[in-house]
Image: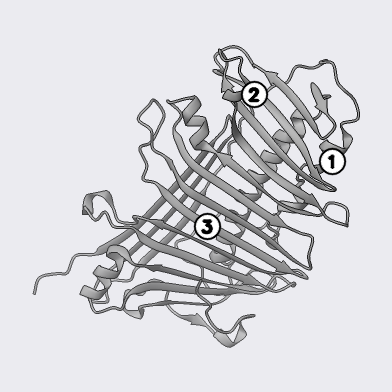
Amino acid sequence: MTEEPLHTLELELELELELELKLELELELELEFDPTGSPPGIMVVELEGPMRWMIAVWFAVGVTGCGRDEEYVEALPNANQVRIAVPEEGSSRQALGESSAALVGTTSEFYQFTYGVSTGLNTTTVALIALLKGITTYPSTSSTLTSRTWGPHTPGGLEPLTFRLVVTKLATDHFSFSLEGRKKDSISDADFLPLLDGDVTKGAAVNTGRGSITVHFDNRRTLIPSACERGNVVFVFDNTQPTVTNDVTLDQFANDNTGVGCKQEPITDASYHFDQTAGAGNFVFSFKANIQKATESKPALEDVSIRSRWTSAGAGRADFEIAGGEVATDLAAASLGASVTASQCWSSSFATIYETSAPAQLNLIPTDGNESACAFTSAMLP
């Protein structure tokens, strides 16, 4: 009898965001399975990552200020408004990907994955806020009755753009902000395009508010045709209510240019949703990606989604699914259903107490532990 070849599903997602700010998030997932049910499958999830941000918007020290900027500076978003608060294990948390699969009693890899993604998004938003705060450390350059402007300023050297930041009061406690760029040989205000903009409405309590932040990579590429990235990244946040929410959307994002250092990656759509009430949280993220190996010549996009939930004490559960595309085709050909799913529960000390996967024939994660011990006793796929 001819031995059946291993079918391999491989996911590689690398997001590199750059606005003279650079975020690199690499996520790799590899699933191997034999349609006959043997040998055992392998699951490897790795979040690599240093988040590398480079801030290259400079405003000269000692510029003449117009005074009374505090209201506009304080209106800008702050880290408390945009934070995704996943419970933290502490220094004993091992790096994601150190083992091929978690065992009951060891630190939950799905918890670590959730924590790693949330930390990456927090780093992103905090860096964007730090950029705005850094600029407004200096007095504004000009003002009107309802606005403050920092710049225009050209950093010099090889930087091809001139920048300015405009903060506008739209109504009581409601402000917009726009970090803009234009080619440095232009002198027309009409040539400025928003690179990072948004709005915020201050809440009644200190450090609360609701609003949005958008990073416009398409505009940056318009100004710098050799820029690697395209698309937009949008952050929407609200911590003014008992249930705190934070949503992040990648719209047609890709590092897909052909220049030096660019990666010719496929266009990505992805979404992240977080909500939390009294310390209990729900974090959902999903995206479309071709998870097949390039050598397999399978170009269709699969749907990848994960939901993590946790109690105020930190105990939680994550449910994972890959569906659609050629994964569904391969599974159907092997009479193994339409999607790959996996679940893992952890205790308040973040130790794995239950895990399972389906189809069982793949043996992706053998069932171990007792599901009744989970803080959430049934799966809730996104």
Residue 97 seen by the camera: no
Mark 3 or mark 2: name the one nearer the start of the chain. 2
Is 367 located above or below residue 252 in the figure? below
Mark 1 or mark 3: name the one nearer the start of the chain. 1
Q: Nearer the viewer, residue 365 or 71?
A: 71
Residue 362: which quarter of the image?
Answer: bottom left
Question: In the rendered image, which residue does mark 2 sit on?
Answer: 163
Amino acid bearing label 2: Phe
Residue 229 seen by the camera: yes
Amino acid bearing label 1: Glu
Question: In the rendered image, which residue does mark 3 sit on?
Answer: 271
Is 372 located above or below residue 205 in the figure? below
Q: Residue furthest left?
A: 1
Is 45 located above or below residue 328 in the figure? above
Residue 278: which quarter of the image?
Answer: bottom right
**Secondary element at tag 1:** helix
Query: The N terminus lies in which quarter of the figure?
Result: bottom left
Q: Nearer the viewer, residue 91 or 174?
A: 174
Report x, y in % for residue 4: 17, 69
Q: Real-space Cα distance between discs 1 and 2? A: 21 Å
Report x, y in % for residue 131: 70, 34
**Secondary element at tag 2:** strand
Q: Real-space Cα distance between discs 3 and 2? A: 29 Å
Mark 3 or mark 2, whichever is nearer to me: 2
Q: Is residue 126 left or right of residue 105?
A: right
Report x, y in % for residue 125: 66, 45
Question: In the rendered image, which residue does mark 1 sit on?
Answer: 74
Tell me the number on the disc at residue 373. none
Q: Residue at x 81, y 43 (%)?
A: 75
Amino acid bearing label 3: Ser
Q: Residue at x 54, y 65 (%)?
A: 110
Is 67 located above or below residue 96 in the figure? above
